[in-house]
Amino acid sequence: MSNWLLNRLFEAGDQPEPRFAFQGTVNWMRALAEVVNSGVCDKENLKLLYKEVQRRNMNPEADNWVFENMHMAYNNLAALNTLNNDAIDKYDVCSSAIVSWYYVIYFASSAMIAASSGSKQENHTATARVWQADIAEKKLIPYPFSLYLSSLVVSKAETEIAIYRGSNKFSLNDRSGGLEVAHGGIVSYLKGTHKYKREEAERRIQNSKEFKALKVDNFRKKIARELRDKTLDRGQVNFLIQAFRYRGKAHYRDSIFLSYGDNHIDSIGQLIKDLNTVALGFVRAASYYCSVRVERGTWDLFVDDINNNTRLSLDVDAMKV
């Protein structure tokens, strides 16, 4: 069967190979879900992770921001749960499921930031930067959400990636089957996101006044590399940045690969199930962290209130501690 649309987009020269785009999308989420299903976000493990976290001084305004963002995460989790359980044709909802998944992660991350420092960010990029400083670097989120890169400079990032990888040889080309394969895929997506963010930053640098003033065409000269690396060293990669890239790939740039061409209905069904698993694990972790930071007793009041007044069908168990 001829793929007229795909051929047309390929001729335009800016379309990914559908097989590899699809493979990376389903395999990363499968890897994350396998780790979550191993128990890392179970109640006992989360209690252990957050047992040393101190309750902060009372800050009602910041607590309001925690509760508002966790409620929005719960709304998106409810949508994802319905897409997973009730949608008849999973192809119809796969793109929407990824968007709902992302906003679960985003709003839960914003709640964690509010619980940590009480700060508010104006956009997704700023949220990811503060989440790394407030949460990831302080080891306040369980693996697999905890991996991050402190710089976009190639030498620094590759050193950190090598530490995460160790002797693991698996990648996103391998369908996850066990925690070792899953870890290889998770590290591979981290590496791929580093490449994506580095190239994005390099394009931005090449369009800057500072770069144009050097009168060069690339980064071969030392002065150009120094300008590049100074900027790249301020960059970073973390789970929230990976999630933002994932949403963009599936919802914007590479959207054709999800519901067009070859039939992968079993993989799509598993993908939506895995999205739900991963989002649920992240909400559990965020809930435990936020509960030990907000004013004593208010987390239980928040969960009880949602339970008594929500019109959503999703049980509030995910936020109970």
Image (spheres, rainbow, N blue to C red):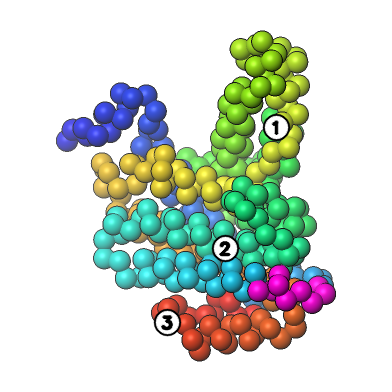
Answer with left or right where residue 147 lies relative to residue 56: left
* Span shown in magenta: 56-64
- The answer to whether any part of residue 166 appears in the image is no
> 9 or 182, which lies in front?
9
Instruction: Write down the residue under mark 3.
Output: 311
Quadrant in the picture for the C terminus? bottom right
Extreme residue toward the left, this view? 1
- CA separation, marks 1 and 2? 27 Å
Identify the residue under disc 1. 232
Kind of residue at disc 2: Phe
Q: CA distance from mark 1 to mark 3?
A: 46 Å
The residue drawn where x is 72% and y is 76% is 60
Residue on which disc 2 sits: 107
Task: Evaluate whether residue 122 shows in this view.
Answer: yes
Q: Amino acid at mark 3?
A: Arg
Position of residue 286 measured from the top left corner of the image (x, y, whole percent): 64, 68
Query: Which corner quadrant of the image does residue 52 belong to?
Result: bottom right
Instruction: Determine which quarter of the picture holds residue 115.
Output: bottom right
The residue carrying pointer 2 sits among few (fewer than 14), some (14 to 19) or many (20 or more) residues within 10 Å by Cα, namely many
